[in-house]
Image (cartoon, rainbow, N blue to C red):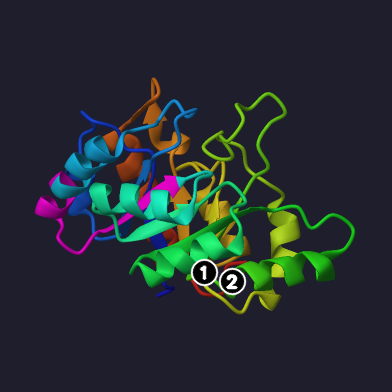
Amino acid sequence: MKRVPHLKICGLRPGDDLSFLRHSVVSHIGVVMVPASRRNVSPDEAGQLVRAAKRIRPDVIAVAVVSGGLGEDVAEAARRAGVDVVQLHGGEPRDVAVRLREAGFRVWRAVAFDPGDDATSFLDVLRSHASSADAILLDAKPPANAEPGVTGGHGRAFDWNGLVEVAPALSFDWWVAGGITPENVRELLNRVQPVGIDVSSGVEVGGRKDVRRIEQLIQAMEAWGHESLSVS
């Protein structure tokens, strides 16, 4: 049996049905604290969601997605939200990550997967980010018409073929986001085995999280885990 990766359901908002947390595959939840995002929640709203989630699953890891801001401001918002991890999604300088870790938070760094013609230089960039983060989240580049600061959550997949080429050189914990759905997750996992996957729009119906879609995603992941190890 293959190791099923961790699963983060991101972009939760007040009123979302949290019953999907009964599935142990869901190890992380995410709240977006980016004002320009349609999934934006305030630190207080995030705190209510996190507390509700942890009443159901005390072991679930809560992640706050932020873009921009100084280390002290981000840390204060994260404290109010009661999260365990801060996911930097706006190209924040290294000192923001350092200050957040000093404040007791784990830090993830989101990086657009875009090795271009120089994979070696791209890997150097990833390693540099990884030196001040607990994990790297590889995401798709935002579309040209994206709101400033909204660097994720667009439902776009990046070049997974390119990821296959780069993955063997990734020596740190890395996650994949961007356009992952119940219909394509097995294709992704047949190509690469990240520590975890991060899903938002791929499990939404009408712009809100859908428990049935989440369960379909989990079923697809578990089915992949039970496939023969010879599958490629």
User: Residue at horizontal 83%, vertical 71%?
Assistant: 120
Q: Nearer the viewer, residue 221 or 45?
A: 45
3D distance between C-alphas at marks 1 and 2 = 5 Å
Residue 56 within the segment the image draws in magenta: yes
Q: Nearer the viewer, residue 225 or 61?
A: 61
**Which one is nearer the viewer's eye here, 128 or 186?**
128
In-image side of 29 versus 165 (left or right): left
Residue 215 location (% of width, % of height): 30, 44
Side of 107 relative to 149 (left or right): left
Residue type pointed to by label 2: Ala
What percent of the width, then of the height, locates residue 211?
27, 36
The amino acid sitting under disc 1 is Ala
From the image, tell me which residue sits under label 1.
133
Disc 2 element: helix
Q: Secondary structure at mark 1?
A: loop
Q: Residue at x 51, y 37 (%)?
A: 153
Q: Quadrant of the N terminus?
A: bottom left
Crowdedness near tag 1: few (<14), some (14–19) or many (≥20) residues, C-alpha within 10 Å: many
Camera sees residue 212:
yes
Which residue sits furthest left? 55
Marks 1 and 2 close (CB-CB < 8 Å): yes
Does the image show residue 4?
no
The residue tagged 2 is 130
- Which label sits on residue 174? none
116 displayed left or right of 123: right
Q: Which region of the structure is painted magenta?
A: 52-65
How many numbered marks are there?
2
- Please name the residue shown 58% across and 36% down the image: 149
Q: Is residue 109 magenta?
A: no
**Label 2 environment density (alpha carbons within 10 Å; few <14, some 14–19, many ≥20):** many
